[in-house]
Amino acid sequence: MKHLYIIGARGFGREVYNLFMQCKEGLGNIECKGFLDDKIDSLDGYMGYPPIVSSVEDYEVQPDDVFVCALGNVKYKKLYVEKILAKGGNFVSLIHPGVQIGMNTKIGCGCIVRTECSISCDITIGDFVTIMGYSVLGHDCIVKDWAHLGAYSFLGGFSEVGELATLHPGTRLLPHMKVGSNAIVGAGSVVLRNVKPGVTVFGVPAKNIIF
């Protein structure tokens, strides 16, 4: 029996627990034992969830433990995943059973893929990537480690999303376009030109913005 712990017990954590319940039959002999979060009252007022057992910092990884990270901010996701990896922890991917996946597509470890996504053929998805519901990935896309794709994202064929990049809900990435590492694309934006690493773009067409 494997014991699953979800990193993060807040809104996204509760969503990921529901995803686990939808995936459970296909995961084999695994039980969700609870959440790791330093905000111990995160589940107050919510019913039916397993407990918060510890913070990430204080948790001692056991041989039968596996983990998934339910943090939407890519920088915090990387930070807390690496804390568990440093303790010898192993991560699993949760992929909704309704997701369509084409041939020759590779999905790394620690990924979260939510309901009704369409992932075409010959795609490479790295480790610890989050793909929210109803997203569409065209053929030959590359999504690198730690990236976050918001709900209803669209990636055209041969497009690429860099490490730690964030696509907010409704992003449209045209074929062959690239979003650089650590870049952010605002909600509803249409990417017509490559997005440089570390910049934030927004709009139709997407343009650089400075806060």
Image: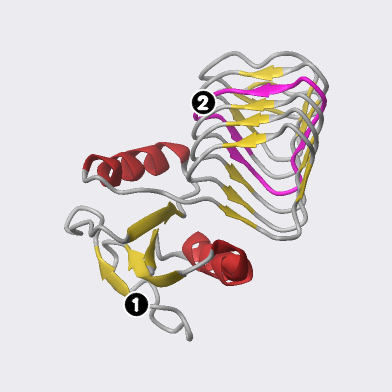
Residue that appears at 40% across and 78% down = 50
Secondary structure state at the residue bearing disc 1: loop
Res. 51 mark: 1
Dot 1 or dot 2, earlier in sequence:
1
Give me the residue at 52% from left, 28% from top: 211
Which residue appears at 23% of the width and 56% of the height?
61
- The image shows residue 41 at horizontal and vertical percentages of 32, 74
Write down the residue under mark 2: 163
Magenta range is: 148-167
- Name the residue nearer the viewer: 167 or 175: 175
Q: Is residue 2 above or below residue 182?
A: below
Horizontally, is 23 left or right of 38 in the view? right
Magenta residues, dominant SS class: loop
Q: Is residue 78 left or right of residue 19?
A: left
Query: Rounded to the nearest whole Å, what is the CA distance between mark 1 and mark 2?
Result: 32 Å
Quadrant of image for the N terminus: bottom left
> Which amino acid lies under the numbered mark 2 shown in the image of this protein?
Glu
Q: Nearer the viewer, residue 99 or 17?
A: 99
Question: Where, by quadrant of the figure, is residue 31 drawn?
Answer: bottom left
Query: Disc 1 residue type?
Result: Pro
| For residue 168, side relative to residue 17 (left or right) | right
Check contact, mark 1 vs mark 2: CB within 8 A.
no
Query: In the rendering, which numbered label is found on residue 184?
Result: none
Q: Position of residue 6 (x, y in %)?
A: 41, 61
On whether residue 161 falls in the magenta region, the answer is yes
Does 208 appear above or below 32?
A: above
Q: Is residue 17 above or below residue 144?
A: below
Position in image of residue 170 (x %, y %): 76, 42
Q: Secondary structure at mark 2?
A: loop
Q: How far from the left and from the top, in percent, is residue 149?
A: 64, 40
